[in-house]
Amino acid sequence: MTTSQRRRRIDYAIRYLILGTAAAVLVYPFLYMLSTSFKTRSLVLGAPLDLIPSNPTLDNYAQALGANNFGRYFVNSAMVAVVSTALIVALSSMMAYAFSRLTFPGKRVLFTAIVVGLAIPTMMLIIPQFLLARDLHLLNSLQGLVPFYVGTALGFNTFLLAGFFETIPRELDEAMIVDGAGPWRRYWSLALPLARPALATTVIFAFLGTWDEFAWALTVLNDTDVRTLPIAISLFQGQHSTSWGLVFAASMIAIVPVLIVYIVFQRFFVAGLTTGAVKG
Amino acid sequence: MVSTQLTAQLSAEPTTISRRPSAAGRRRRRRGVFAAYAFVLPGFALYALVMLYPAVQTLLLSMRDWHIAPGAVSPWVGIANYTKAFGDPIFLNSLLNSAVYTAVTVPLQIVIGLGLAVLLDSKLPGRTAFRVLFYLPVVTSWVVVSLLFQYMFSSGDGAANAVVVDLLHVVPNNVAWFQGRWTAIAAICILGTWKGIGWSMLIFLAALTGVPKELHEAAAIDGAGAFKRFQHVSLPSIRPAMTVVVILLVIGGFNVFISVFLMTGGGPDNQTQVPLTYMYDQAFKYYKFGYGSAISFSLTALVLVISGIQYWWTRRSTRM
């Protein structure tokens, strides 16, 4: 073995050692949650660091799925997330297309308003948004969540997609204009198909953002049957403060869709982060 | 980046208008403008309704003594809510808590995130798997991880006590993490760091991938070791990414909410309040909408000023 080969091996060994330790520390809490969700109530407070439960049980999952309208909350969250995501993608891609390709008076002012809005934390607006929802009779209903989820997500996604549309060569538009294609056809059959990777990023971030949203849902929803999953899980913890196994079984069920979306589409996360460079 | 391209393109726009159009051309242009508004207005109207209008309302509400009951009079009180906030020890403490949270979590996320990114920035087998694992906490719901860390730091036999007492022997007895201000904030900081590392790692990794290999090779030929190459080749190249990461992490740090809300609820005795949990309590527990809005607006203004200073400072130091 030459010296350079040996040095390379040592270099790899050190890298793997550090990366492996970091991965273990970062993943440990998830394994801990998974393991607790399989423990019976009495064993939960046993040996805290043991990851393999001695008598694993599915009781917590059965109880979480059976009791407390859990299926209902899952469906509520899914409906709100799907409808909001569809609207976010449609409206923000239309706005982004207009900002990137069409000419109209007031374009600069409107685009500046979008960019300025990126600096406003949504939580700052929660009081006036609550009063607005009250005045529009949108409190305490799932339909009431959607306009707020969509409206607050439009700025970031419009900005991200406009940046992507800018990278599509203008010659393609001009060729379609010569063929007599109007703006709707150019948007639908040119810009959207070419922007598929950016649209995928938008879909993922919009879905995760609405699926996990907590503060607004907590503020406007009161009745049991309109709760979404994050609210249900936080209340679960309040009602069954010692049944951590149950709380984490419910949590596991809630994060499974997120994990599937994440692992299947993980390459789009990198794309979305580096084009937008905004925290998701 | 994206924004500069767009603004350049926007400012180039008006030149096309100077040609005098024919009647048919004018009609076509007018139709084009209608189409453009049809693209923009549905989205923009909603955006204005739920973002721009409430942003203005926050300022207006903060200057009134707001009464929630329908038909009740809400008198204008000028800056009274602001003078109250800056004389309110709980609000001032909440600012201090979020400043401590930011001062602890931001450097940790940057140092660890950058370290992991450097280690991953090579043709290492299993690179993608590590990247996916490191980013896992970022995509998991704040609600779930807050409850998880609340459980791990629970005073009885939580995992955190098992680590510090039985495994590392750094403290003799179990710590009641959420009974004291600084132990509770430590737990919240550990959660914040754990959840954020993957995000900064990914941004730094993308920036490092963009550094030309030739630069590293040239520096190596000149006899620069790994550390020198990192210091003089990698670090300057990822500077723009660093600026973005620092500014966004600081904004995120001051706006910490869900973890504190669920793990301590601001307690014990308001000691672990951060500005947003205190605002939320004032608004939705005590219905003091005017006072809550003043807290919101103060926090946002403060954070914007801090980010502005950071931006100005990094631009100034890069020019020199």
Image (cartoon, coloured by chain):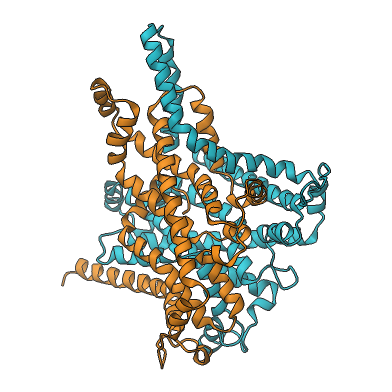
Chain colours: A orange, B cyan
Residue A155: x, y in percent?
Answer: 50, 42
**Residue found at x 25% / y 26%:** A176
- Vertical order, A254 against B103 (above or below): below
Q: Nearer the viewer, residue B57 or B158?
A: B57
In the image, taking residue A157 as reference, residue A10 lies left or right, namely left
Task: Identify the image quadrant of residue B116.
Answer: bottom left
Residue B274: x, y in percent?
Answer: 67, 61
In the image, taking residue B256 as reference, residue A93 lies left or right, namely left
In the image, taking residue A225 as reference, residue B184 lies left or right, namely right
Q: Nearer the viewer, residue B91 or B218?
A: B91
- Number of callouts in the render? 0
Q: Nearer the viewer, residue A4 or A186?
A: A186
**Residue found at x 41% / y 6%:** B20
Residue B8: x, y in percent?
Answer: 43, 27
Can the viewer see residue B316 in this picture? no
Residue B24: x, y in percent?
Answer: 36, 9
Q: Nearer the viewer, residue B246 or A218?
A: A218
- Vertical order, A251 against B258 (above or below): below
Q: Quadrant of the N terminus of chain B?
A: top left
**Residue found at x 39% / y 45%:** A275
- Vertical order, B223 against B127 (above or below): above
Task: Identify the image quadrant of residue B152.
Answer: bottom right
Can the viewer see residue A204 in this picture? yes
In the image, taking residue A215 as reference, residue B124 lies left or right, namely left
**Residue found at x 60% / y 87%:** B156
